[in-house]
Structure formats: structure tokens, C-alpha cells
Image (tube, coloured by chain):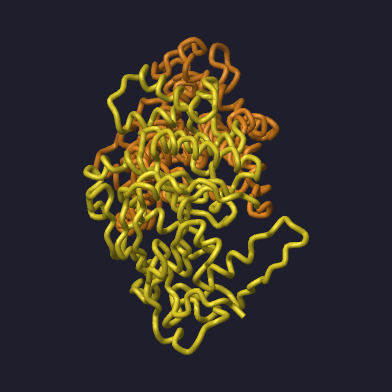
Amino acid sequence: MAVAEQKKTTNAKHEPKVLLELEGIKKYYPIKGGILQRKQGDVKAVENVSLKLFEGESLGVVGESGCGKSTLGKAVLGLEELTEGKIVFQDTEIQDLKRKEKLKFVKEMQMIFQDPFASLNPRQRIGHALEEVFTMHTDMSAKEKRKAVIDLLVEVGLKEEHFYKYPHEFSGGQRQRIGIARAIALNPSFVICDEAVSALDVSVQAQVLKLLKTLQEKYQLSYLFISHDLGVVRYFCDRVLVMYLGNTVELGTVADLFNKPLHPYTQALLSAIPRPSVNAKRKRVRLQGDLPNPANPPSGCPFHTRCPIAAEKCSSEKPAWVEYEPNHFAACHFAGQPIQ
Amino acid sequence: MAELATAPGAGVNKEIKRERTFVVTMKRLLKNKLAVAGLIIIILQIGMAIFAPLITFHDPVKQDINASELPVFSENHWLGTDNYGRDVWSRIVYGARISLVVGLIAVTLGLIGGTILGMLGGYYKKLDGIIMRIVDLLFSFPGILLAMLIIAILGTSLVNVAIAISIWSIPTCARIVRGSVLSIKEKEYVMAMKSLGASDLRIMFKHILPNAFAPIIVFATMRMATAILSTASLSYLGLGAQPPTPEWGAMISQGQAFMWSSPHLTIIPGIAIMLTVFAFNVVGDGLRDAIDPNMDI
């Protein structure tokens, strides 16, 4: 995917404001077994993730399946209870709030789901599904709600006559637009896109991404853009976080991360992007073996079992999260070292 | 990137199936000849129950000592009369009212109780263990015995029969609903509603229940047959309808003393019960096959 890296400078000019801060987020799923269902261990889905998200920025989260990127998104939204850690949103700690207190923040944080068909109730007309959002959070009259829903439908590129249709009557792209409409209905400041375009085909992906961009400019939205598609992330995001086995591996601006990746895992991921040019010469970094079991992660650096440049130190000592360049973090003992 | 833009074929099939579920289901149901026969019987019965005063010419409880034990096809009494001279046709027609109403009340109450328990158990993991153990406890009684026990506590009457049968329907219904809820609550649209801040009640009744309806409908139809049969059984044992109420089970019980002289007094209500139970069962079977042949009931 040949997409130039224009833009992405807008936020750097003036000091950006922190919208969301994660501090040492951990999410473990207990493994229970035996007759008494006793806890026998943990699946470490998210291990110690800390990061800051600025207002109006898009932060991409990439990694292979099962690396904990979706769990991270759900944990931020409170759909998964945290094992440990702090979520600070608009200067308020929100991880321990009760449902009623949390409703205020629910308006501000929304999510767009991966499968646009599965995320809509098949027995509810989409107009009513959107109205329900207003019913839950506002005191609008039936007439006002209807008008708001129709405005929303037009905003995301659908039509008024779609109001009384069921989800199955729409195409994949249209359904994802409905998902987007529902997410922006309450005018949030932060939207998590969990593989929001992965289920769509390429031409529709582009349209939906464009819509997301337009909305971002119009409403000053911040996105946490979870994806496994590096091409899309490169086009869409300002900064990228790479995750591996629940751990943060590297974080940097799109330009930094794609041009001079520090972590060998990032380098391997980038070398897997298909290039459209026939003559392009490139070195393919192939990783050996499978993703280790997150219930029993490797000692030291979680990546050392598959790392092409791993040394003895890597299996015993966990690398620290270090800022190697301004705004470019990585967790590797040999950060920046090229792979032979 | 192209291979990542997944468009699974399974999803496409699901869409086609979703198209006007009701119409598709009815079309499939009407292809099933046995189910159509059952439907006709049920419709006739409902008609009988509603228009009872119009299609009978005798009071079902009025005795006429001069016309007792008339055989089938007698003048004025085409299904004959019983030992007190009451018209069997009138009693059968009015009996349809009782069977359907008691069945309906029993099934409705059972569905309400079972659905609430099943929803709570399926949705709240913490309650699941407790509720399912209570259900297991109810399951461990043989149905008729449980009903007799409840009637022994509440006293004999048709209303108590309905209550007893409904209590006996609760555990089965709770199991079925719980199963559906367990699978539906993992769906992404439930997650989406949670992320929008929906309350548990809203999620349960507005988003999970409508999607769990198919198995509930099938269960209700089949349970109607069982409820009607149980009403007749309990009345036969003298625990339900009391004389002179024209209830089918009670009619058999009273008629069996005259088995040899007037066999129609037992055979005719027997046929009525059999046809009704058969009809509800085949319609339930047909519905299950029409909605989803793999459904687990």
C-alpha cells in the first residue's frame, strides 16, 4: 500500500493536551481447573501497558492475533475489569467508578466494533437502535430523537429512508457506517476502533477510513485505532503502538516507526508488508515458531524465543521501556540494531 | 491487504436466512403435512371453544334422567348422553374451553417464571449456580407427583391445576432460556450495548430476549400438549375439575363405570384428548424443524 506520509504534523506544533492516560494496565484471565474450580494460573492478556493519548490524535495499536490489542481496548472502555492499573480520562480516574458515575464518561468514550453485522441487534430496526442511544443518555422527546437520528444517518452518508430497515438489509460498509453513527451519536471525544475496517473489502475500507477522518476533523475526535493491517495504520494514524504477547514493544510516530524501527519485532512486522513494486529489493525477516502461550510467557524479554538477534541477556532480563529518541519508545536490549 | 479484508461466506448465508424470518418459517412449516394437519385441528378447537354456545344445543351440565346413556347418533344427541342424560357433544365442546384455557394459563405462567430464572441464571454468572441447583431440585420430582404435591397443598381446583403444571414447566423452560442467553450474551451487539452504557435490564429484555424467542416458542407449543394431557390426568384422578364441570379427564373418569354398557362415554373424550395432544406436538415439531433443524429441544 503506497501511501505517502503527509500530514501528522498538526499535533506536534503546539503542546497537545493529554486526553487519556493508561498507567500499568494489566488484564489477567484466571485459568480455573479441578473439581473445586480453583485458580491454577493466569492468561496474561495485557501486561503492564502505560501510554498517553493526546486530544485529536489517532493512535494505532498493531500486533498479531492474541497479542492483547482488543483486550486493551475493551479494558479502557470498562468492558473488561482491570486486574491492575489506572485509567485517567480527562483528569479523572475511571477504572473503579460505579456504573451510574461512569455514565458521564460513557458519553465521552465510544467504540466501533470489528464485525458490523454482529455488533447490531438483528431484530432491531437501525433507526430504533440509534434512538435507543439517546433514550439512555438524554431526555429528548420522541420527535427530537427521530430528527437527531436522521441527522446522524445523513452525517455518516446514509439516507433518511434507511431508518426503518433491519441490519441484514445493509451492505457491510453501510453497516459499519451505522456502527460509526452509533458511536458518535453522543458526541464523544474519544473513539476506540477495534479492527473497524478489517471486515470490509478494500474499496469500502477506504471510504470508511475517509469518513472517520472527516469526523475526526469536524469533532476533534481522538482515536485508538486497533488493527492488524499496517498499511491502514500507516495511512490513518499519527502514532503507532506495537504489542507483542500483551506487552508494549515499541511506540513512536508513524514516520519514526516505519522508517527506523527500533525493535526487531517491529522490523519483522514491517518486512511482512507486501510491496507493489516488482523491483523492490527487501530483506524479509522471518520469525521462527509460534506465539508463546500467554499463560506461560517466556522469562526475560517475551520476544526472545523468536527474536533473530536475541542474546543470553534477553532470556533472563526483561528490557525496560526506554525513550530512545524523542517520542520514540521501545523495550529491547538491542534497540535499533539491524537484523543480520 | 486483500486477504485481510475478510468477507466470510458463512456470513452471507446468515444474511439470506435472516430475510423475513417469519414468512420463511411459515412457508417451511406449511410444507410439513403433519404440522398442517395439527394446525387445522388446533384452529378447529379454538373455534369450538370460542363458539361453544353456537354449536351446541344442550346445557353441558343439565341432567335429563329420561335420556340417560343414549348411544351415539341418537336423535337430538349425536354423540349420545351420559348416565345423567347430559349431552356428550356439549360437554366435549365446553371441555375444549377448559383444556385450552388451563393449558394456556399453565404454559404462560411457566414461561414467565422459566424465562426470568433462565435469564438471570444465564446472564449473571454468580446466580447461575444457585438457580440451576433449584432447577435441578424441581427436575428430580416426577412431573405428576410434583403436581399432586402442589395440589395437595393448594387444594383441588382447575386454577390450582394450572399453577401446579406451570411450576412443573418452569425448570425445563429455565434450562432452555439459560442456554440461549449464554450464547447470545457473548454476541458483539450485547457488548456494544454495554459500551453505550445500557443497564442490565435493558440488555436482557430488549436485546437478549427477542433473540432467544425461537426456542421459547417451540417449547411453549410442545408444552401446551403436555399441559393439556396433565390437566386431563389430574382431573381423571379427581384432583382437577370437580363434577359437574365438563372436563375431558373427568369425563373419562366418570364414564369408566359404564365401560361395557356405554363405551362412548370414555372413548369420545379419550379421542378428544389424543387429537389435541397430537396436534400440539406435531405443530411444535414442525415449528422446530422450520425455525432451525439443529435446535436443541
Q: Is residue B292 visible?
A: yes
Check the image and name the residue furthest to the front.
A13
In the image, taking residue A3 as reference, residue A113 lies left or right, namely left
Residue B76 in the figure: left or right of residue A299: right
Residue at 51% x, 36% y: name it.
B221
Q: Is residue A203 above or below residue A254?
A: above
Q: Residue furthest bottom?
A: A312
The residue nearer to you, when weighing A153 against A230, is A230
Q: Position of residue B265 (x, y in %)?
A: 51, 30
Q: Nearer the viewer, residue B85 or A203?
A: A203
The reply to whether residue B133 is visible in this rendering is no
Please state the total of marks drawn on the protein image: 0
> In the image, is B200 to the left or to the right of A130?
left
Compare residues A62 and A76 and report the one nearer the observer. Answer: A62
Q: Residue A296: give x, y in percent of width and height.
A: 44, 78
* Viewer-proximal residue among A207 and A38: A207
Q: Quadrant of residue B155?
A: top left
Residue A47 higher or lower than A155, as above or below: below
> Residue A163, image x and y in percent?
50, 24
Percent across and percent down for residue A25 are 33, 63
Chain A appears what colour?
yellow
Which residue: 56% across, 51% down?
A: A5
Q: Colour of chain B?
A: orange
x 59%, y 77%: residue:
A339
